[in-house]
Amino acid sequence: MLNKIKVLIVDDHSVVRKGLKMFLESNPSLEVCGEAEGLGDAIRMTVKTKPDVIVLDFKLPDGDGINGSITIKARFPDVKIIILTAYTQKEMVVGAIRAGVDAYLLKDIDSDELTKTIIAVYEGKSVLDASVTEEVFNTLKIENVNTKSKYNLSPQETKILEMIALGKVNKEIAEALGISDKTVRNYISNIFKKLNVSNRTEAASYWIRKTNTQ
């Protein structure tokens, strides 16, 4: 690998940050480009250091991994996000997936596995900790069945709302669905009206809250 993968570590415990930095930088493919102790700091450091991957704790002093991922993905859609946490609750995992995270890992993960995951998400793959995978996938299947009746959204609107929650921009949505940018804008306008929201972040947050309470 010619260029190192730039990693930003976000955790409110300095000992955790320093430990992560020490073993990540022992891998010649990785470079820790910065550390942050909260979401506000993470945004500022992302602007400053332009990381490829953010390793994000779920619970932070100024927010959580779901809202943090939505905010980061909305502003920096190309940045990959790995949630590294001690929480295994299904609603947190599903919410994180809806928010567009690229991996959800537990803090007891082996250091070599974390390194492999960073490289994997950088290459475009998605990774879930094995201990939460089956239950989460079953939940997502049920949500997909119930989506249309719960929100009164058409199948196409549902797909677009999911993509919005994943941080996709209009051009990416249009290309994925084989429709024009203008058509995407029209769909999004209709979605906003149905959900009674005024912007993409509100729509994504609404989607996550509602799917987590099904």
Image (cartoon, rainbow, N blue to C red):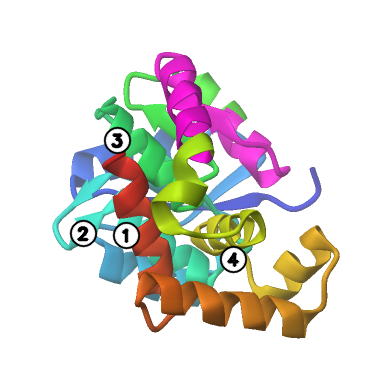
Q: Nearer the viewer, residue 160 or 69?
A: 160
Q: Nearer the viewer, residue 47 or 206?
A: 206
Cα separation, mark 4 vs mark 2, equals 19 Å
Cα separation, mark 1 vs mark 2, equals 7 Å
Q: Amino acid at mark 2?
A: Gly
Q: Crowding near pointer 3: few (<14 within 10 Å), some, many (20+)?
A: some
Name of the residue lying farthest toward the right: 178
Residue 181: image quadrant is bottom right
Label disc, if present, on residue 83 of the rendered structure: none
Q: What residue do we see at 61% from left, 36% from top?
A: 126
Q: Nearer the viewer, residue 172 or 196?
A: 196
Q: Amino acid at mark 4?
A: Pro
Q: Secondary structure at mark 3?
A: helix
For label 3, the residue is 91
The image position of residue 198, as x and y in percent, is 39, 84
Q: Is residue 3 left or right of residue 71?
A: right
Residue 39: image quadrant is bottom left
Q: Are marks 1 and 2 in contact (CB under 8 Å)?
A: yes
Q: Which residues are magenta?
A: 117-144
Label disc, if present, on residue 77 of the rendered structure: 4
